[in-house]
Image: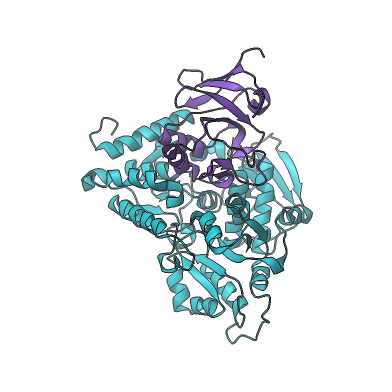
Chain colours: A cyan, B purple
Amino acid sequence: MRGGEFGPLRQWAIDHQIKVGTYLGAADLVPVTQAHIMADTESLGRSGVEWLERWTTLPPAQRQVRIPAITDPRGTDFAHAQRLKQQPWMLDLERRAIAAFEALGVLMTDTCINYQTIMPPVRGEHVAYGDTGVVIYCNSVCGARSNFEGGPSALSAGLTGRTPRYGYHLDAARRATLLVELSWTPRELNDWGALGGVVGRLAGDYSQVPLIVGIERVPGPDEMKHFGAALASFGSVPLFHIAGVTPEAMRVEDVVPAGQTLRTHDVAEADIRALQARYAGNKDAIDVVVFSAPQLSLLEMQTLAVLLDGRNAEIPLLAVTSPQVKPDCDRFGLTARIEAAGGTVLSGMCFYQSYAREMAEANGWRRLATNSAKLANIIGGYGYRPVLLSMEQCVEAACAGSKPKPSVRA
Amino acid sequence: MTERIFYAVAGMGRKVRAQALVASDGFSARYDLDRIRGTFSRPEHKLAGKSYVGRVLILDAAKGGVATAWMLREMTARGVTPAALVLNRANPIMVQGAALADFTVISGFDRDITKAIPDGAEVEIDPTGERPFIRVVSSISSS
């Protein structure tokens, strides 16, 4: 590959992996079974799209991925781009990126919840995943092995079928490095996200692996999703353990070597409320409500539909899900119920990866309510003032003037 | 100020000489930057409102998501980019992004590099040798 025998794209890919692996101390490469590629066009830019297109003229044998490669959300939902006031040039760039990836043999799944919808990895499986929320969920809840693989590196893994063996591919890196003793178990998804934010700030960087003790019940997949996504977002952390819950930490001693003392932090409800208070705001002065980051599961969409039954959103309310969940929402009538209440169901995109700054300017959006701690953490940099609320509170904020009516479906 | 050299554990890219912009804070191209205007845009960031264009960013740790892996190249293509990145702790995304963009990054020091380099100092970075380093050429007041 390095000599160019398999074409210039695979040559670039292996060179890229060797550069990265050398920097990060990889001894060799490890075979991987799947790649998940983050490549929205706001990140790629024109130059990134042109860079991808450059490779599409190669013969198929030289340009196509060797292992299943799927994509993270795109920067638009074409069906609703006009509603979002996205510009034609953004859509053109998205179409070009999609065509380029398809030419490389990538499956355009456009999801950041592939672990809920496509092919969850199994314990010990080495993968090359992008999107920090995907990595932390699959490492922690599934027991898979991945580093944060940005778009270029995930694409490289797709092309070579391997990735540099450093970090979370290694046993030694997966042991706990700090202990979080929890005295309060979150209830709402935004609480789980806020807990992820608190732990992420305590952890602080990529090498840290929190071990959580004291949770009173087994969190569900959506709770794990919001917790992990926020932990990865606030702390750049790709792995956590929950004692007695996550597969590598059935016992504390499984992830804490004998005789090792970990730095320990107590986390109480007050800590979680304090983080939420940083994103407090007037619920009556919201410009847009966004459920996104991560994309909503089928069950989250059902909960939202129930909350909206008989209501009328008086400001834009956007519910973002995956292209795999959306057809089920359509079949089960959830899309119709959300849209009957004035909401918009978006598929295959992610709010913050969809030219969020330009959408804010075009729509006059500044004060954004969400139940995603991850989105609240990110979106301030795009000029928004995020308000972190529960899903129910978000619905109340959107429907401030409309009273709930009895629902025949709820 | 006396010339001082600080050696890093790892480095990548080309030799760079430029003015330092220093803060004890993290770095993510997606979370922290207005990449059109070339400024730090995250209100909570210690460099909020400051231009990063052409400056050597000296920060604590790589933060945030995976987008920086593409964004460093996109920023470089438009010429709205820092001169280099110097971090106490890099994460793989910064390294992957630097590898794609041929961007200069060094990381890993025997001290807190954000305390060792004065804001506004002129610095030289050489990631090309066996021991990548940053050298303070002259200490000047922050602009």
Observer-nearest of A287 and A218? A287
On screen, residue A272 versus residue B50, left or right, reads: right
On screen, residue A96 versus residue A287, left or right, reads: left
Residue A309, image quadrant: bottom right
Residue A70 x %, y %: 39, 54
Residue A194, image quadrant: bottom right
Observer-nearest of A15 and B47? B47
Report the residue at 49% width, 38% height from top: B80
Image quarter hosting the N terminus of chain B: top right
Report the residue at 50% width, 37% height from top: B94
Q: Is residue A44 above or below residue A8?
A: below
Report the residue at 59% width, 32% height from top: B89
Residue A364 x %, y %: 58, 62
Furthest residue to the right? A270
Residue A322 x %, y %: 46, 64
**Residue A379 visible in the shown view:** yes
Observer-nearest of A12 and A143? A12
